Amino acid sequence: MKTPLSWLAAVVAALALAPAKPLAKAEKQPNIIFFLSDDHRWDRLGSAGHPFLKTPTLDRLAREGVRFSNMFVTTSICAASRATILTGLYERTHQFTFRTRPIDSRFSQASYPVLLRKAGYKTGFIGKFGVNVQQKDREAMFDSFQPIGRAPFFKKQPDGSLRHESELAGDRAIEFIDQHKGSGPFCLSVSFNAAHAEDSDKRPGIGHFPWPKAVDGLYEDVPIKAPRLSDPKIFESHPEFMKKSMNRIRFFWRWDTPEKYATNLRAYYRMITGIDGVIGRVAKHLEKAGVADNTIIIFSGDNGYYEGQRGFAGKWSHYEESLRVPLIIYDPRADKNRRGKVAKPMALNTDIAPTILGYAGVKLPGHYQGRSLRPIMIGEKPKDWRRDTFCEHLMENATIPKWEGVRSRRYVYARYFQQKPQYEYLHDLTEDPDQLKNLADDPEYAKVLKRMRKRCDELRDEYGGEYDPSLVAKYVAEQQRKRAEAQAKRKAAQQKKKQQK
């Protein structure tokens, strides 16, 4: 990315962090547990109005806490989104996604777990880390780091039995709570691999979406209707580069026939209900451990999911199904009149780190690009709250078109800037909430298009400037050179061994 010197100077200056500022001594620092689901869109919760998906624990947390109905990720892919969650920065700034360099130490050392540790918190991580950081940075983040890989979902245990990744995450969360209860505040991040599909196993149902045994048979008797927006005309209305993208390629893996769609949807929903059960088990253990009254629970998703809608699979692109995710914040200390609220202001994954630090009473780094959601949690209505957000997808992949855009309260603008010619979208969410009409060429929206283009330029330049593919190309070339050198060394060693024999 081409980085304006003025922007870089501002970031460097902001990284001169003030010491972590704890809460006043009269206040007790809360424990915080942050649960993150994978490939989980905003309306896949019972509390968000789903007709049959069972999420009783998350629904209870929403009833007793606050559910944010307009929560968005700024990049809809796990690597970039999780880096944003850690650092409070847009992808355009932290510059991390698949096939890039590790997150810069300047940003890793200002991540929420590092700052919490400096403020006296015990920090833990369990599950899918999903980002690449230098070892010294990771060691600065967590007192306890227990990654759990996705493949396979069922892990063989010492006694020979198999246990699902989600259940293992719950087991280790309970162990962490028992280890640290009563010894000062803790912050535990539990990041599920579920409900992500097992991409290496193309068998429908249990192959794609291996669910925990506790939910065997669930939804088997539920009639599964065709996905919304499944009219073939909707898919055909897209430009060729989107019809040939990964969104379409993976559609044929999971959703292309009514039988596969029903089988995979039931399996995917079982995985979500399985996550809900694990969160319920951990929440119940907080009560048993005597720390429930002072433990804040936050739940969100790392990106959305198409589920076959529009003839698409996966996420990655600019539609609502891709960008919009759930967010629930439960604070057991909150006033009763603040329970069960649905907050409508726009929240972002950039806000997770500031919110966690805000609850802990830790001063936010000046370079953070998100904001704490605590004012909204206590019923305030900040006059200067955001009305739009920059969003983007910059991964180097021939089948995932890069794009950048702006999502406002009413309009969505996206430009797929590497297409020749550049391809633009403009949607009016008030008139067309399903985003079925592209208004970029509509003369009646010419002024809106011009305004959204300008706003996109402003935000892009604020967060890092135009995309520079040479940065990624250099890194990929460097990695290829290192792999070639390592392979040559192995072959030389093998040859030498043969000669010695």
Image: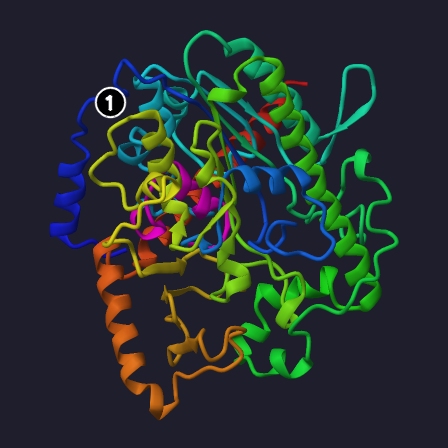
Q: Amino acid at mark 1?
A: Ala
Q: Position of residue 206 (x, y in %)?
A: 80, 46
Q: Position of residue 62 (x, y in %)?
A: 55, 42
325 shown above or below 150: below
Q: In this image, 282 relative to 437: left or right?
A: right
* Magenta stretch in the rendered image: 75-93
Residue 289 position by quadrant:
top right
Q: Mostly what secondary structure, the magenta segment?
A: helix
- Of residues 337 and 214, the one nearer the viewer is 337
- SS state under label 1: loop
Q: Position of residue 462 (x, y in %)?
A: 21, 56
Residue under the image location 49 percent in, 54 percent down: 69
- Of residues 66 and 173, the one nearer the viewer is 66
Report which residue position mark 1 lands on: 20
Q: Is residue 13 visible?
A: yes
Q: In this image, 177 relative to 152: left or right?
A: left
34 shown above or below 98: above
Q: Is residue 498 visible?
A: no
Report if residue 79 lies within the magenta region: yes
Q: Residue furthest front?
A: 337
> Which quadrant is home to the N terminus?
bottom left
Q: Position of residue 468 (x, y in %)?
A: 30, 58
